[in-house]
Image (cartoon, rainbow, N blue to C red):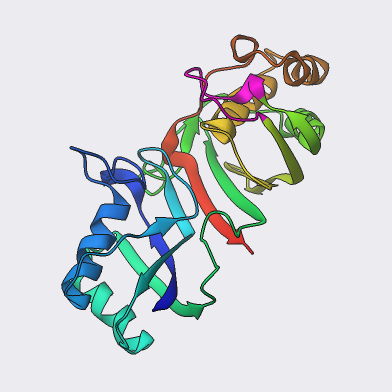
Amino acid sequence: MRNIKLTIQFDGTGYHGWQTQSTDCSVQQTVQEALARILNCAITLHGSGRTDAGVHALGQVAHFSTASDIDLNQLVSGLNSLLPSDVVVHRAENVPADFHARYSATARVYWYFIWNSSLGSPFCSKYAWHVKKLLNSVNMKSAAAHLVGVHDFSSFQASDKQKVNPVREVTRVRLRRVRTDLLVFEIRANAFLKHMVRNIIGTLVEVGKGKITVEEFKDILDANDRTCAGPAAPARGLFLKEVIY
Protein backbone atom coordinates (compact mmCIF):
# COMPACT_ATOMS: atom_id res chain seq x y z
CA MET A 1 0.00 0.00 0.00
CA ARG A 2 1.13 3.54 -0.78
CA ASN A 3 0.36 6.56 1.36
CA ILE A 4 -0.13 9.63 -0.84
CA LYS A 5 -0.23 13.24 0.30
CA LEU A 6 -2.17 15.83 -1.70
CA THR A 7 -1.84 19.61 -1.50
CA ILE A 8 -5.10 21.24 -2.56
CA GLN A 9 -6.33 24.76 -3.25
CA PHE A 10 -10.03 25.54 -3.30
CA ASP A 11 -12.50 28.39 -3.44
CA GLY A 12 -14.91 27.51 -0.65
CA THR A 13 -17.74 29.77 -1.83
CA GLY A 14 -19.84 26.94 -3.23
CA TYR A 15 -19.06 24.31 -0.60
CA HIS A 16 -20.35 23.47 2.84
CA GLY A 17 -16.81 23.28 4.21
CA TRP A 18 -14.10 20.67 3.75
CA GLN A 19 -15.62 17.70 5.58
CA THR A 20 -18.04 15.32 3.89
CA GLN A 21 -21.68 16.09 4.74
CA SER A 22 -24.70 13.82 4.53
CA THR A 23 -26.59 16.24 2.28
CA ASP A 24 -24.44 19.26 1.38
CA CYS A 25 -21.58 19.46 -1.09
CA SER A 26 -18.10 19.38 0.48
CA VAL A 27 -14.57 19.65 -0.89
CA GLN A 28 -13.54 16.33 0.67
CA GLN A 29 -16.37 14.45 -1.03
CA THR A 30 -15.65 16.16 -4.35
CA VAL A 31 -11.99 15.07 -4.32
CA GLN A 32 -12.82 11.57 -3.04
CA GLU A 33 -15.22 11.01 -5.91
CA ALA A 34 -12.61 12.08 -8.45
CA LEU A 35 -10.04 9.76 -6.85
CA ALA A 36 -12.50 6.85 -6.96
CA ARG A 37 -13.03 7.37 -10.68
CA ILE A 38 -9.30 7.41 -11.40
CA LEU A 39 -8.34 4.51 -9.12
CA ASN A 40 -11.52 2.51 -9.75
CA CYS A 41 -12.19 1.91 -6.06
CA ALA A 42 -13.59 3.71 -3.05
CA ILE A 43 -11.09 6.05 -1.39
CA THR A 44 -11.11 7.58 2.09
CA LEU A 45 -9.43 10.97 2.10
CA HIS A 46 -8.14 12.36 5.41
CA GLY A 47 -7.72 16.13 5.67
CA SER A 48 -5.50 18.23 7.91
CA GLY A 49 -8.63 19.65 9.52
CA ARG A 50 -12.10 21.01 8.89
CA THR A 51 -12.85 24.36 7.33
CA ASP A 52 -16.17 26.17 7.72
CA ALA A 53 -18.62 26.65 4.87
CA GLY A 54 -17.33 29.43 2.64
CA VAL A 55 -13.72 29.29 3.87
CA HIS A 56 -11.00 28.98 1.22
CA ALA A 57 -7.66 27.16 1.13
CA LEU A 58 -4.34 27.91 -0.52
CA GLY A 59 -2.69 24.85 0.99
CA GLN A 60 -5.08 22.26 2.39
CA VAL A 61 -3.34 18.90 2.89
CA ALA A 62 -4.94 15.48 2.70
CA HIS A 63 -3.74 11.89 2.42
CA PHE A 64 -5.10 8.53 1.33
CA SER A 65 -3.91 4.94 1.00
CA THR A 66 -3.99 2.98 -2.23
CA ALA A 67 -2.57 -0.19 -3.78
CA SER A 68 -2.38 1.54 -7.18
CA ASP A 69 1.00 2.18 -8.79
CA ILE A 70 -0.29 5.22 -10.70
CA ASP A 71 2.33 7.84 -11.57
CA LEU A 72 1.94 10.88 -9.32
CA ASN A 73 2.07 13.37 -12.19
CA GLN A 74 -0.66 11.42 -13.97
CA LEU A 75 -2.68 11.37 -10.76
CA VAL A 76 -2.50 15.17 -10.44
CA SER A 77 -3.40 15.80 -14.09
CA GLY A 78 -6.18 13.22 -13.95
CA LEU A 79 -7.69 14.69 -10.82
CA ASN A 80 -7.63 18.23 -12.19
CA SER A 81 -9.31 17.07 -15.41
CA LEU A 82 -12.22 15.72 -13.33
CA LEU A 83 -12.46 18.32 -10.58
CA PRO A 84 -14.48 21.53 -10.94
CA SER A 85 -12.49 24.69 -11.58
CA ASP A 86 -12.83 25.85 -7.96
CA VAL A 87 -10.81 22.87 -6.64
CA VAL A 88 -7.23 22.27 -7.85
CA VAL A 89 -4.72 19.64 -6.71
CA HIS A 90 -1.28 21.25 -6.82
CA ARG A 91 0.90 18.37 -5.69
CA ALA A 92 0.91 14.64 -4.95
CA GLU A 93 3.71 13.03 -2.95
CA ASN A 94 4.53 9.59 -1.62
CA VAL A 95 4.85 9.81 2.16
CA PRO A 96 5.69 7.30 4.92
CA ALA A 97 2.97 4.93 6.07
CA ASP A 98 2.70 6.68 9.43
CA PHE A 99 2.09 10.13 7.91
CA HIS A 100 -1.31 11.58 8.77
CA ALA A 101 -2.49 14.88 7.31
CA ARG A 102 -4.03 15.95 10.62
CA TYR A 103 -2.04 14.27 13.38
CA SER A 104 1.41 14.73 11.82
CA ALA A 105 0.92 18.50 11.44
CA THR A 106 2.89 20.74 13.79
CA ALA A 107 1.28 24.07 12.85
CA ARG A 108 -1.34 25.72 10.66
CA VAL A 109 -1.29 29.20 9.16
CA TYR A 110 -4.40 31.21 8.30
CA TRP A 111 -4.84 34.49 6.44
CA TYR A 112 -7.82 36.80 6.82
CA PHE A 113 -8.54 39.64 4.36
CA ILE A 114 -10.45 42.81 5.26
CA TRP A 115 -11.44 45.28 2.54
CA ASN A 116 -11.38 48.53 4.53
CA SER A 117 -12.96 51.21 2.38
CA SER A 118 -16.17 53.20 2.18
CA LEU A 119 -16.59 51.67 -1.28
CA GLY A 120 -16.83 47.99 -2.07
CA SER A 121 -14.75 46.06 -4.57
CA PRO A 122 -16.13 43.62 -7.15
CA PHE A 123 -12.81 41.77 -7.00
CA CYS A 124 -12.84 41.24 -3.23
CA SER A 125 -16.52 40.60 -2.59
CA LYS A 126 -16.04 36.80 -2.34
CA TYR A 127 -12.66 36.84 -0.64
CA ALA A 128 -12.66 39.63 1.95
CA TRP A 129 -14.86 41.16 4.64
CA HIS A 130 -15.93 44.63 3.59
CA VAL A 131 -15.66 46.99 6.59
CA LYS A 132 -16.59 50.54 5.63
CA LYS A 133 -15.38 52.37 8.75
CA LEU A 134 -11.67 53.24 8.71
CA LEU A 135 -10.00 50.84 11.15
CA ASN A 136 -7.22 51.79 13.54
CA SER A 137 -4.74 49.10 12.47
CA VAL A 138 -2.15 50.25 15.06
CA ASN A 139 -4.51 49.40 17.91
CA MET A 140 -5.50 46.17 16.21
CA LYS A 141 -1.83 45.13 15.99
CA SER A 142 -1.30 45.93 19.66
CA ALA A 143 -4.33 43.88 20.66
CA ALA A 144 -3.37 40.95 18.41
CA ALA A 145 0.06 40.77 20.04
CA HIS A 146 -1.64 39.50 23.21
CA LEU A 147 -2.61 36.32 21.33
CA VAL A 148 0.97 35.06 21.06
CA GLY A 149 1.81 32.30 23.52
CA VAL A 150 -0.04 29.44 25.17
CA HIS A 151 -3.57 30.48 26.17
CA ASP A 152 -7.02 29.14 26.86
CA PHE A 153 -8.89 30.43 23.80
CA SER A 154 -12.40 29.69 25.11
CA SER A 155 -13.37 33.33 24.51
CA PHE A 156 -12.85 32.79 20.79
CA GLN A 157 -14.32 29.30 20.57
CA ALA A 158 -17.55 28.56 18.70
CA SER A 159 -20.62 29.16 20.83
CA ASP A 160 -21.60 25.49 20.41
CA LYS A 161 -18.56 24.46 22.44
CA GLN A 162 -17.07 21.16 21.37
CA LYS A 163 -15.62 18.96 24.07
CA VAL A 164 -11.99 19.71 23.27
CA ASN A 165 -9.10 21.22 25.17
CA PRO A 166 -9.35 24.99 24.50
CA VAL A 167 -5.63 25.57 25.11
CA ARG A 168 -3.65 26.40 21.97
CA GLU A 169 -0.24 27.89 21.26
CA VAL A 170 -0.11 30.84 18.88
CA THR A 171 3.43 31.39 17.63
CA ARG A 172 2.93 34.31 15.25
CA VAL A 173 0.45 37.07 14.44
CA ARG A 174 0.84 39.77 11.80
CA LEU A 175 -1.49 42.53 10.69
CA ARG A 176 -0.54 44.80 7.80
CA ARG A 177 -2.05 47.11 5.26
CA VAL A 178 -0.85 45.95 1.87
CA ARG A 179 -2.54 49.02 0.40
CA THR A 180 -4.68 51.76 1.87
CA ASP A 181 -7.86 49.72 1.64
CA LEU A 182 -6.73 46.12 2.25
CA LEU A 183 -5.79 44.65 5.63
CA VAL A 184 -4.19 41.19 5.84
CA PHE A 185 -4.13 39.30 9.13
CA GLU A 186 -1.91 36.22 9.54
CA ILE A 187 -1.93 33.82 12.47
CA ARG A 188 0.08 30.66 13.07
CA ALA A 189 -0.71 28.14 15.81
CA ASN A 190 -0.26 24.48 16.61
CA ALA A 191 -4.02 24.02 16.17
CA PHE A 192 -7.23 26.05 16.12
CA LEU A 193 -10.61 25.77 17.76
CA LYS A 194 -13.81 25.87 15.72
CA HIS A 195 -14.45 29.46 14.55
CA MET A 196 -11.39 30.64 16.51
CA VAL A 197 -9.86 32.80 13.77
CA ARG A 198 -13.19 34.31 12.72
CA ASN A 199 -14.05 35.20 16.33
CA ILE A 200 -10.62 36.75 16.85
CA ILE A 201 -11.01 38.85 13.71
CA GLY A 202 -14.51 39.95 14.65
CA THR A 203 -13.20 41.15 18.01
CA LEU A 204 -10.12 42.84 16.52
CA VAL A 205 -12.39 44.78 14.16
CA GLU A 206 -14.25 46.05 17.23
CA VAL A 207 -10.86 47.26 18.50
CA GLY A 208 -10.19 48.91 15.15
CA LYS A 209 -13.53 50.71 15.33
CA GLY A 210 -12.75 52.00 18.82
CA LYS A 211 -15.51 49.98 20.49
CA ILE A 212 -13.02 47.86 22.46
CA THR A 213 -9.68 49.05 23.84
CA VAL A 214 -6.42 47.12 23.58
CA GLU A 215 -6.57 46.45 27.30
CA GLU A 216 -10.16 45.21 27.05
CA PHE A 217 -9.12 42.81 24.27
CA LYS A 218 -6.58 41.28 26.66
CA ASP A 219 -9.30 41.03 29.32
CA ILE A 220 -11.55 39.24 26.81
CA LEU A 221 -8.81 36.70 26.07
CA ASP A 222 -8.30 36.08 29.79
CA ALA A 223 -12.02 35.80 30.52
CA ASN A 224 -12.37 32.39 28.82
CA ASP A 225 -15.95 33.35 27.98
CA ARG A 226 -17.27 33.50 24.41
CA THR A 227 -19.98 35.98 25.37
CA CYS A 228 -17.32 38.60 26.13
CA ALA A 229 -15.87 38.63 22.61
CA GLY A 230 -17.11 40.29 19.44
CA PRO A 231 -19.14 38.73 16.61
CA ALA A 232 -17.67 36.19 14.23
CA ALA A 233 -16.20 37.61 11.04
CA PRO A 234 -17.66 36.30 7.77
CA ALA A 235 -16.18 33.06 6.44
CA ARG A 236 -15.44 34.49 3.01
CA GLY A 237 -12.34 36.41 4.16
CA LEU A 238 -10.62 33.37 5.68
CA PHE A 239 -7.95 31.27 3.93
CA LEU A 240 -6.06 28.23 5.18
CA LYS A 241 -2.65 29.33 3.91
CA GLU A 242 -0.56 26.28 4.74
CA VAL A 243 -0.14 23.29 6.98
CA ILE A 244 3.33 22.70 8.42
CA TYR A 245 4.88 19.30 9.16
Residue 223: % across, % down: 74, 13
In this picture, residue 183 sits left or right of residue 87: right
In this picture, residue 161 sits left or right of residue 71: right
Asked if residue 134 can be seen in this view, the reply is: no
Q: Nearer the viewer, residue 157 or 239?
A: 157
Q: Quadrant of the N terminus?
A: bottom left
Q: Nearer the viewer, residue 240 or 208?
A: 240
Q: Residue at x 32, y 54 (%)?
A: 28
Q: Quadrant of the C terminus?
A: bottom right
Q: Nearer the viewer, residue 26 or 217?
A: 26
Q: Which residues are magenta?
A: 154-166
Magenta run includes residue 16: no
Q: Residue at x 18, y 37 (%)?
A: 23
In this picture, residue 43 sits left or right of residue 138: left
Image position of 150 with respect to 25: above or below? above
Residue 49: % across, % down: 48, 48
Residue 60: % across, % down: 47, 58
Q: Nearer the viewer, residue 87 or 141?
A: 87
How many badges with numbers are in the image? 0
